Every structure is written in C-alpha cells, then in structure tokens.
Image (cartoon, rainbow, N blue to C red):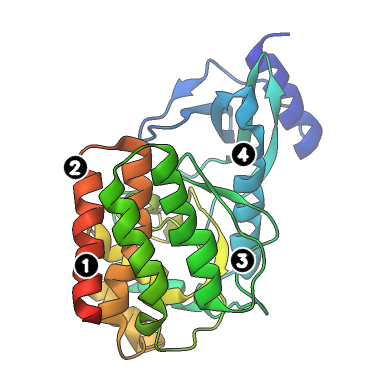
Amino acid sequence: MSLWEQISRAITDTSGKPFHPQTPATVGGGCINTAMRLADGPQQWFVKLNQASRLDMFQAEAAGLQELADAGAIRVPRPLCTGVADGQSYIVMEYVALGGSGSSALAGEQLAALHRHQADAFGWQRDNTIGSTHQPNGWITDWVDFWRRQRLGFQLEEAARNSLGKDIQRLGERLLERFPALMDHAPAPSLLHGDLWAGNLGYDQKGNPLIYDPATYYGDREAEIAMTELFGGFGQAFYDAYNAAWPLDAGYATRKTFYNLYHILNHANMFGGGYVGQAQRMIERLLAELG
C-alpha cells in the first residue's frame, strides 16, 4: 500500500468510520514537518509527516495535545493517531479551518484558565521537543532546580555540542550559578502549551481561540507569558484579559528576559546566526542586573 493508503486505513481503524480521501492538499506554515489535509466529504484530517525516526516526536505531540484538550480551557486540535508508513512517521489530528480573526481578549482569558490546571511537580509524563530540539521533562519538585537542569542547563549543553562559542558557555555557567536570585517567587506547576508564539495561536471560523504545535509541560506560567512577548503579535487586549483573570506576580518584568533566554538559546542551537549574539547579550544583561 502507498503512504496515503496506509494512513487512510489507520484513520479508518482508529476513528471507526470508513475513510477514502481525495488527493491530499498541502497546508503551509511549518518549517519542520510536511503538513497535509486529507478529506473524504465532511471528514477532514490534518496530517504531519517527518522521517520515520521522528515518530517519538509525534507521539509526544499527540500526548501533549490530549493533555491540553482534557483541561477543557482552550481549544486544541484533537489528536487521532500516530504511526509509520512507507518510511515516514506521521501524526493525524482534527482538521480545524482557521477563520483569521477572533477575540485576543478571550484567548488571554482562556489561557489563564489553562494555567489554573496544575500538577504536584514541574515537568511532564514524558520528554518532548521544542521545535526540533529534545526537551527533557523529568518531574522535579523544585522549580529553580528544574529550570537550571532541564531548561537553561540543557540548552547550554547543546550550545557546547554545537560549538556556539566559549563566551556563551562561560557567561552561561556564571548565570547558572547566580540565577536563583532572579527566581524570587514560588510558582505553582501550571499546565503550559510550552511554545506559545503568535504562529501557534489561531482562531476557528467562529472566532474561538485555538492553540497547536505544543511543547507541553507543567511549569511557571510566567514562562508562557514571556514567550508570547518574545516575538510579539498578541495585542494588549490579550494581556489585559489574562491579568484580569489572574494577575502576574511582582518581578515578572525581570524574569521575562530570563525565561525567554531559553527560547533564544534554542533558536541559536537550531539556526545559529544572529541568535547566538542575541543569547549572549541577554545573558550579559541578566548578569548586569544581578550586579
């Protein structure tokens, strides 16, 4: 059987409904996976493809989508199945037609509701990926320890493996020694999307917010809000509604740079270029604030 015949059979077997799609249609927007829409009349599914070796990435994404969906706070595409067909790994999920506009205030309110879902420790049931980078999520009860070992520390180790420069390592190690002074609050382990930039938020045709492509884990909600500010695009109404539902703690403005360093380091590890210098400048700024 061809790739699409195998995927169609998996959809039939998992959904319990016969599925005989028309020619797959390419869906744009991703830089890591190939994205397609499969349709058989009113039945429509969104399919992402990658190398067979990336099946674990799709399995983690499906589990993350289900975790977010189970919270019932904000809409996500419901995952259906994952597998390998014709030498490629795949994930099949609900296809949601995006409408292009909606209430950013409602998105902020619903994100605050998502963050109200909490765990007893920081991390998640399994590791996943942030972009194409491995993201370790072993459970740790102390947030400072979690962020040191499984976020900044891990990215700095990746930077060393990728030979991004001795300055990054030297400055990063200094920050790891001193950064507990930046973490002057005691966050609860909130359910996070984990990779929430504007490209991972949309609105369905009824204007309801929809989040997708998660890097799910339980962590400080400020880390999520910080990323929404990193590349922009959310609008003041989003933040006003979030803070009306659940105000951020004092000191967030300083911690924001600290949290976003994780994502800039990840971009440096994936893409190099100007992100390396940006990461170094962020570390220098944080060290200067510490005095």
- Regarding mark 4 in the picture, which secondary structure is present there? helix
Q: CA distance from mark 2 to mark 1?
A: 26 Å
Q: Please say if the residues under marks 2 and 3 sit with CB atoms less than 8 Å apart.
A: no
Q: Please, is residue 21 above or below residue 241 in the view? A: above
Looking at the image, residue 134 sits to the left or right of residue 127; the answer is: left
Q: Which label was assigned to residue 235? A: 1
Q: Residues within 10 Å of mark 2 (few under 14, many from 20)?
A: few
Q: Amino acid at mark 2?
A: Gly
Q: Quadrant of the N terminus?
A: top right
Q: Amino acid at mark 1?
A: Gly
Is 89 in front, or is 169? 169
Label 4 belongs to which residue? 58
Looking at the image, residue 111 sits to the left or right of residue 93; the answer is: left
In primary-sequence order, the first of circles 1 and 3 is 3
Q: CA distance from mark 1 to mark 3?
A: 29 Å
Label 2 belongs to which residue? 274
Q: Please say if the residues under marks 2 and 1 sit with CB atoms less than 8 Å apart.
A: no
In primary-sequence order, the first of circles 2 and 4 is 4
For this orientation, the residue located farthest to the top is: 1
Is 277 in front, or is 190? 277
Which residue does the image show at 59% across and 62% down from the upper left? 68
Label 3 belongs to which residue? 123
